[in-house]
């Protein structure tokens, strides 16, 4: 069983690294690196390491779901699709250069209309 508080605190410790895809190798993650890692940990679905490839294949790799019903491992697009986070329980975790790791409830993000789209990773067939 996932302990949401423990996971959120663990993610809060991650430093930002421009282009960071591998926490150990890059000594930090960017928004795609963090979202990809959370998705994989929560769902066992491995998304492409390259964000350009992932965005080009997003229709094949994910399905759009209702903004009000995200679950652990779903990708949350923000800022007109230029920023991504991932769901853990009732929270979205994301990272930016200016603010580091941020954690916000899905409900608060919905009230503030921050969520552009929620994508559920498809399991490999």
Image (tube, grey):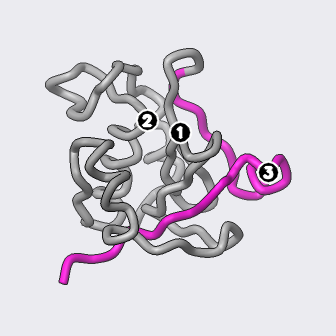
Residue visible at 61% across and 60% down in the picture? 117
Question: In this figure, which residue is indicated by the disc labeled 1?
Answer: 83
Of circles 1 and 2, the one toward us is 1
Q: Secondary structure at mark 3?
A: loop
Marks 3 and 2 in Cβ contact (< 8 Å)? no
Marks 1 and 2 in Cβ contact (< 8 Å)? yes
- Pointer 1 or 2: first along the chain: 2
Mark 3 is surrounded, within 10 Å at the Cα level, by few (under 14), some (14 to 19) or many (20 or more) other residues, namely few
Segment colored magenta: 100-125
Image disc number at residue 113: 3
Vertical placement of 60 versus 13: above or below?
Answer: below
Mark 2 is surrounded, within 10 Å at the Cα level, by few (under 14), some (14 to 19) or many (20 or more) other residues, namely many
Residue 105: say if magenta: yes
Pinpoint residue 103: horizontal percent, then vertical percent.
Answer: 61, 39
Residue 88: say if magenta: no
Q: Secondary structure at mark 2?
A: helix
- Pointer 1 or 3: first along the chain: 1
Question: In this figure, which residue is indicated by the disc labeled 2?
Answer: 31
Marks 1 and 3 in Cβ contact (< 8 Å)? no
Mark 1 is surrounded, within 10 Å at the Cα level, by few (under 14), some (14 to 19) or many (20 or more) other residues, namely some
Residue visible at 45% across and 70% down in the picture? 120
Vertical placement of 63 versus 88: above or below?
Answer: below
Describe residue 106's horizontal placement relative to residue 17 as left or right: right
Query: In the image as oriented, which residue stretches furthest toward the front?
Result: 56
Pinpoint residue 69: horizontal percent, then vertical percent.
Answer: 64, 73
């Amino acid at each position: 069983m996932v302990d949401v508080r423990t996971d959120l605190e663990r993610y809060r410790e991650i430093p930002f690294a421009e282009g960071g895809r591998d926490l150990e190798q890059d000594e930090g993650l960017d928004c795609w690196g963090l979202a990809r890692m959370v998705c994989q940990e929560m769902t066992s679905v491995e998304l492409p390491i390259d964000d350009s490839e992932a965005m080009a294949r997003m229709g094949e790799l994910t399905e759009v779901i209702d903004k009000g019903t995200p679950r652990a491992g779903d990708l949350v697009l923000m800022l007109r699709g230029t920023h991504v986070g991932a769901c853990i329980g009732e929270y979205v975790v994301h990272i930016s250069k200016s603010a580091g790791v941020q954690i916000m409830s899905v409900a608060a993000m919905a009230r503030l209309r921050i969520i552009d789209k929620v994508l559920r990773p498809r399991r490999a067939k």
